[in-house]
Amino acid sequence: MQNINYSEIFYSPQGEGHYTGVCSAWLRLFSCNLQCDGFGQKDPTDTSSYELPYKSFDASNIKKMTDLPVFEKGCDSSYSWAKKYKHLTQSKSVSDTADELEDILPTNTFKHSHSNQQIHLCITGGEPLLQQGSIVRLFKEFEARNNLPKFVTFETNGTQKLTAEFKDYFEEYIANGNEVFFSISPKLYSITGESRDKALKPNHIKEYYELSSQGQLKFVIDDNQASQNELEEVIVILRQNDICYNIWCMPSGALKEQQQSIARAVSDFASEKGYYTCARVHTYLFGNEIGT
């Protein structure tokens, strides 16, 4: 049976969007279909001007992911898909991955025995929906252990078509009173340099919405008119496809300092338009650290 390939497993409060502050177990799967090299660049649309420290960084002496710096230009989670960091990833059986997730939970179950409150499972990346078969097998493993999480968030760029296996399993999961929450972050050309035809797949996002109406559209923007105008264009397209998730606006920046410098402007824009402001609370709690 195929192993699960992941770059991190950790326990930390959710830092973004609807479930901010909720205790969560995190599984960061390895691999992505986008690179988003434009993040943090002076001009995200000019590839000739890019500076990409994740490419030049010498990782040969790095032994674990948490020893890596957060790169302020290019994708802030490039270690979750770039081949040069593959030696730091894990490839484990479904059973061993479930063991590790349970081991990081304070009371080894998704329902904390002290608070009697649910701990969420957040599956992120990279792009987690590249490994849909592995995700289903992991949930079946938790089911067999009588430790199935009642809440799961998939943090996705929204470009992957759902498989029949995935839809069938999670339709039943939802029917049994559990929640699938899609946190979808479509990548804007003016921020990431990824072309719209590659990065925006409304038909796939519509599939997510049809499976679960619980979710959010989380856009990274800055204080420039270009990203704000593009955001509005993309929202029109998504609404035309009857995708009615709430809209959240999050300030661009891999580092806390970058985010803070434009946070007010992003919040003002979001509030004026009636969207929600998405802070990155984990950066304020833990600083510029991986594994939080």
Image (tube, rainbow, N blue to C red):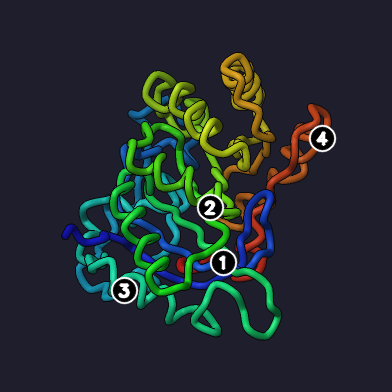
Q: Report the Cα–Cα distance between label 3 and label 2.
A: 25 Å
Does dot 1 land on a helix, a strand or a loop? strand
- Residues marked 1 and 2 touching at CB (< 8 Å): yes
Q: Which residue is mark 3?
A: 64
Q: Which residue is mark 4?
A: 271
| Residue 272 or residue 42, whichever sits in front | 272
Q: Is residue 214 left or right of residue 53?
A: right
Q: Is residue 43 visible?
A: no
The disc, 2 or 4, on the residue closer to the chain's N-terminal end is 2
In the rendered image, residue 262, in percent from the top left (x then y), is placed at 69, 43
| Residue 119 or residue 155, whichever sits in front | 119
Does dot 4 land on a helix, a strand or a loop? helix
Kind of residue at badge 3? Lys
The disc, 3 or 2, on the residue closer to the chain's N-terminal end is 3
Q: Report the Cα–Cα distance between label 1 and label 2.
A: 10 Å
Q: Is residue 267 left or right of residue 145?
A: right
Does dot 3 land on a helix, a strand or a loop? loop
